[in-house]
Amino acid sequence: MRMRLMLLGGGNALGQALIRLGAEEDIGFLAPRPPVQGWDAPSLTTLLDDNRPDVVVNLAYYFDWFQSGSVDEVALASQERGVERLAELCQHYQFVLMQPSSYRVFDGARTTAYSEKDDVAPLDARSRALWRMEQSVRALCPRHVLLRFGWLLDDSSDGLLGRFLQRLEQNEELCLADDRRGNPTPVEDAARVILAVLKQLDCEAPLWGTYHYGGHEASTPLVVGQALLAEAGNHRQLSIDSLTPIAHAACPDAADEPQHGVLACKKIFNTFGIKPRAWRTGLPGLLERYYRHG
């Protein structure tokens, strides 16, 4: 790798997965420790003034954007300012900016897969913030890659997967939608995609733009939950042995979560040759890491 890579968010689950996969191919990242208050516009300015990478991979706010069970609008506003400043700095110094985003920018009203050309219609404060940050990156930093991911699953104890696995150990009914669809995407697979894009950018290919990626085989929360229940049974004595299907409209998050969030991944395959990987193959390793840490 000829390019110098800076990773913001090297301590979170996706950042750690990216560092692990990079190390297997002798690809290293400058991963600075964030300040106590987290990365904001002033600290990012100082960081990039003092360091001159070729590419900045911004996973600084990964947990809030992809895993948190609640939305902090004050934090999101600060993060928006941080992303705007980051985009300005990358343009000023001619760095490449790689920025993650989400299927959440769509409202889920259509039943077919969303392509990069489809109009967005974010449903809640988090998805609206993600869309505004996408717009800032596009407007301020032409040398960018925006990666919209599907349902990201990681091994953090307080993330989406961790909260589900903890509920499996409680003796209560667990209801999941059987008519909501998306692309489950283990965090190691997302890291594989980021690394593959970086390697092609290292060949000086100007492949700027927005790309979709999600695990192969669109699925429902119920089907994913059943697969996780079966795998978790290899690690723990669980209190429940079945899940209850319910309608999307009956879910507590129905107003905020797209009912149909499947992403079409043709563009990333045609441009970078990245093939979607079956999400089921990533579950054993994902749960092994989760229970090992727990």
Image: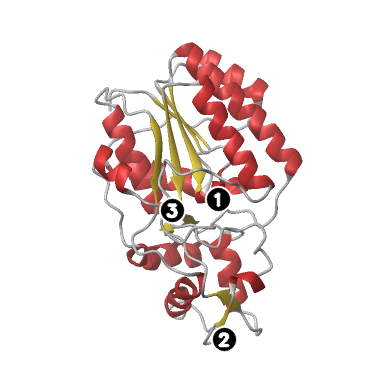
Please say which color scheme the image uses. Answer: secondary structure
Q: Which residue is mark 2?
A: 240
Residue 72 at x, y = what percent? Answer: 73, 46
Report how far apart the C-alphas of labels 1 and 2 lie in the structure: 30 Å
- Frontmost residue, 101 versus 198: 101
The reply to whether discs 3 and 1 touch (Cβ–Cβ < 8 Å) is no
Q: Quadrant of the N terminus?
A: top left
Which residue is under mark 1? 104
Question: Looking at the image, can residue 153 be seen?
Answer: no
Q: Residue at x 26, y 51 (%)?
A: 275
Q: Quadrant of residue 205?
A: top left
In 3D space, how far apart are the residues under numbered discs 3 and 1 (Cα atoms)? 17 Å
Mark 3, residue position? 187
**Count of marks, rendered view:** 3
- Is 191 displayed left or right of 159 in the figure? left
Residue 96 in the image, given as x and y percentages of width and height: 42, 23
* Few, some or many residues within 10 Å of mark 1 (<14, 14–19, 20+): many
Q: Secondary structure at mark 2?
A: loop
